[in-house]
Amino acid sequence: MEESLTIAPLMPGQLLARGVCRHLLAHDFVSLEEFTPERGKRLDVMALGPKGEFWVIECKSSRVDFTSDSKWEGYLEWGDRYFWAVDEDFPTELLPDDTGLIIADAYDAEILRMGPETKLAGARRKAVAQKFARAAALRLQALKDPGVGRAL
């Protein structure tokens, strides 16, 4: 018997993430949303570029969403560049100047400011690449075999 799949409506941050992922794909980056590099950390978008670079993108849908996030600085160590993704109405003066900035909506995005490059150490890059690949493979398998998704 086939299992039916119910899809919940996307939340504002998820809509921003979708637009960001679409835009990054146009730059040959592949992305995973809600990627967990280690226990207790969940990145809104982790993107892998054509030269093996990793970008971390945090999507903020409101001022409150940003000001209530006290963990974002712990995400800096997981990518070569760090970006905020916000909509066009977000008060961007709240965001640190030494981070990247992406303006997005549910359908596309634009990179307004590149985050400074901080290269990952070799051992960290290898660990992130392996976790990224495994997460992508497990998600693909879960699409074909929904019972597998419960174990993720």
Image (spheres, rainbow, N blue to C red):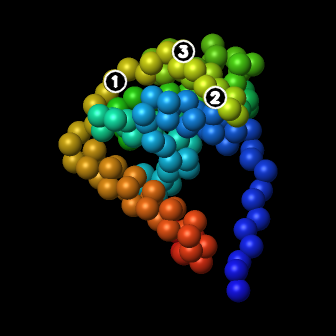
Residue 23, numbered circle: none
Along the horizontal axis of the image, is 109 left or right of 122?
Answer: right
Task: State which quadrant residue 112 falls in.
Answer: top right
Q: Residue furthest bottom?
A: 1
Query: What amino acid type should be assigned to the residue bearing mark 1?
Result: Glu
* Residue picked out by circle 1: 117
| Distance from the alpha carbon under mark 1 to that under mark 2 | 23 Å
Q: Is residue 60 visible to the viewer in this orientation of the structure?
A: no
The residue type indicated by label 3 comes to Leu
Pointer 2: what residue?
Answer: 108
Name the kind of residue labelled 2 in the image: Asp
Instruction: Please report the residue visible at 74 percent of the width from the left and 73 percent of the height from the top.
Output: 4
Label 3 and label 1: CA atoms lie apart by 15 Å
Label 2 Cα crowd, 10 Å radius (few <14 / some 14-19 / many 20+): some
Q: Tell which tag, 3 or 1, sits nearer the viewer.
A: 3
Q: Residue at x 79, y 50 (%)?
A: 9
Residue 48 placement (x, y as % from top left): 39, 40
Who comes first in sequence, dot 3 or dot 1? 3
Label 3 packing within 10 angstroms: few (<14), some (14-19), many (20+) = few
* Residue 151 seen in the current view: yes
SS label for mark 3:
strand
Q: Is residue 50 left or right of residue 115?
A: left
Left or right: residue 105 versus residue 113 is right
Residue positioned 29% across, 52% down in the render: 127
Give the residue number, with chain letter if any, for mark 3: 112
Q: Residue at x 71, y 77 (%)?
A: 3
Q: Residue furthest left?
A: 122
- The residue closer to the viewer here, 70 or 23, is 23
Q: Is residue 137 above or below residue 151?
A: above
